[in-house]
Structures are given as structure tokens and as C-alpha cells.
Image: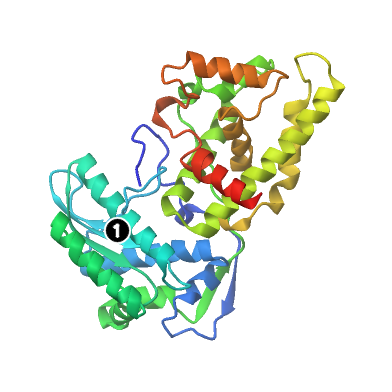
Amino acid sequence: MRIDEQTEAHAVAVYSKRVMPIMQVSLQSAGLIDFNVLRVRAASTDGGRVLFERMIVDLVGVRYPEVSTIEANPGDWGIDAYVGQLFDDEVSVWQSKYFIDGFDKSQQAQVRDAYESALKSAKEHGYSLATWTLCMPCNFDGPNEQWWKKWKNKKEGEDSVVIDLWNEAKLRRLLIAEDARAVRDHYFNALATVPDTPTRPVVTLQDPDRYDGALFVRQMHEAGMLACDEAKEEFFNAEILSTEIADKAVPEEISALVDSRAAVASLWSQRFNSALQSHPGRQLPGLYERAMDAVRQHHPALPKVISCGLIHAFGLVHQRVNDGRAGWVRDFQQIARQHAEHSTSGALVAPSGVPQADTLSQDTVEQKEGEGS
């Protein structure tokens, strides 16, 4: 997972900063350490994952009060909790994976990717990875235990990193210890706080000018729309959403993002085709407004698991435009081709190092869309 150092947004783009209505309910499993309780309290598996990540930070803090974390902005360097200095020092990293429904080949791949991401980030940012601990709320079966031991021994030998495991059994032992009472009571108390469906916060884009060369901005200018700062912020928030989902690589979230992109693409194309029939000229008056109104009306039906806010949904439209697959004038495809030809890389522009609709927008998403057709 990689963070864009030029991005001005900070920790506001995390669940812990959200304000949401809550209600209190009694949980029958209260008092027991059952990690399923976390997704019940959060009203979703995605929310449960966030609580689990926070619990790991707090649990590490019992032993190491100096523990800290890296917030997604849009990446988190492969770190959920760490102890040490992120420059010229050895760092110990704890990586949370909320594998609440078990562990198999898919989870093996996520573990490998998470470890390699942490190792790569350490090399890129000038610190060394001393220990790497996988934290998960399940235990291995026999074949996966064998896989873990072989992979762990191989990587420790290759990379000189101490690799550890906090599985369900280890986490339970840590939580029932007397010094972890406060953490245990906070996450597994008898009166659980269950929030309504969370909404993803909007991150302010501090420097809108960074997107002046982007294709989605040019397409708006071609349609006579010059006030683009709000559109830039919508695009920026969709980038954070997309990159976070790509980094976490949770299949349920990836599928939800694919579905959301397909939905907004369909809403745009229907209104684009209607505008072509209504207006013979190059300009298509009212298309932008009608397309965004349609997204606004459809927004409540988007998959809840990724907590896609309305601003993020608008941003998904701008991402598609930036990919050259939508626009606001009749000849938008020609505009996209010209834009590609005049860009220094020969690709569609995504300024200031921000990933262009992230790694999901072209390869993963198109592959999954093909599989679903």
C-alpha cells in the first residue's frame, strides 16, 4: 500500500472520525471474546474490520504505549500499527486482516501482498522492517497452518524479518490478561453501541489547481462548464475511495465498487444517448445536470459495504470521464484521443501523482466486468 505524499488530506478520511447516529442494544455474547461481535456492533463486515484494526492498535498499546498508526491517505504503507521511527530506524509492524469468515487461498494471497507492501514501503521510505505480525480473528486449519509455517520460514530467511502471528487463540489470550481489561471491556462490553449505516467523510481538496490538466476537467470546459472546483473535489474523494479499496483487496468491497461504477456508467450512457437524439449539435445542454441528478437519485441503492457517499458517487462519474469513457459533448471520444496524444506519457492525465482512478479502474474492474457479462 502506498501513500501519495503530495496529498493534503489527512486522518479525516477514516471511520474513527465519522459522526453517526447510534443506538444501544444488549448483546447476548457480551462478556465473551467473539470477534463476530465487532461486525454486529458496526452493522457491517466493513465496519467490523475498522473496529478490529482499532482494537489491534489499542492492544499493541498495552505493551507499547508509544504505538502509532498510518491513516489511509489514500494508502497506509502496509501498516495498521507500528512501533519505532519511520526514518533511519527499525520498525515493528502489526497488520490487521479481518478474516472473520475463515482462511483459504484468497486470504493467503492477501497476506503475501500485505507483507510485500510493508517491506516495499520500508525500503522506499528509509526505515527497516524488524518484525511483521499478522493479526486475524480466526485460526488456521491443518493445510493452511503448513502453508503459513513454510511461507514464514522462507520469508524470514530471505528478508531477515521476524514474522509473528496473532490469530484468534493468541488474541483471546492477550485480551483476557489483566493488563488488557480496558481494551477488552471497550470492545466486548455488555452494552454495545450499534451505529446506523456509516457514511464516508468528504476530504477537502486543498489545491484544486493540481487537476487543471486532467481530462475530466477539459471535458467540462469543452461543454462550456468553467466552475470545476467542486468536480475536482468529487474526483479526489473517489480516488481515495478507490485506492483504499484496492489497497485492502477485500473481495466484497471490490465487487461493490465494480457494481457502483457499472451503475453510474449506465446512468450516464442512458442520458447521453437521449441527449444525442434531442440535440443535433456538438453541445448537449443539460446532460451534465441530468446525469448527476440520476446519480443523486440512485445513490441510496449503491452497495452499502463501501460506504460510498454522494460526493464519492459523483466522483465515480468523473473518474469514468477521466478514463476517456464518458464526456459531456458529442465528440468526447475525439477530445479524449487528442488529450492522450498531447500528454507527455501518452496516457490520460491524472495530475500530481494521484493514481488515475486507481489500479481497479482499468485492469481489475474491466476484467471483473468482463467476467460478469
Q: Is residue 309 above or below residue 93?
A: above
Q: Is residue 160 above or below residue 335?
A: below
The structure residue drawn at horizontal position 20% and vertical position 46%, both measured from the top left corner, is: 86
**Residue 218 can be seen in this image:** no
The structure residue drawn at horizontal position 44% and vertical position 25%, both measured from the top left corner, is: 351
Residue 36, image x, y percentages = 49, 76
Depth check, front residue: 189 or 365: 365
Question: Where on the picture, by quarter, is residue 233?
Answer: top right
Depth check, front residue: 158 or 219: 158
Q: Is residue 354 left or right of residue 66?
A: right
Question: Where on the picture, by quarter, is residue 268?
Answer: top right
Amino acid type at mark 1: Ala
Question: Where on the picture, by quarter, is residue 79?
Answer: bottom left
Give the residue pinned by disc 1: 81
Q: Is residue 126 left or right of residue 252?
A: left
Residue 159, image x, y percentages = 16, 55
Secondary structure of residue under mark 1: strand
Residue 35, image x, y percentages = 44, 76
Q: Is residue 36 left or right of residue 43?
A: left
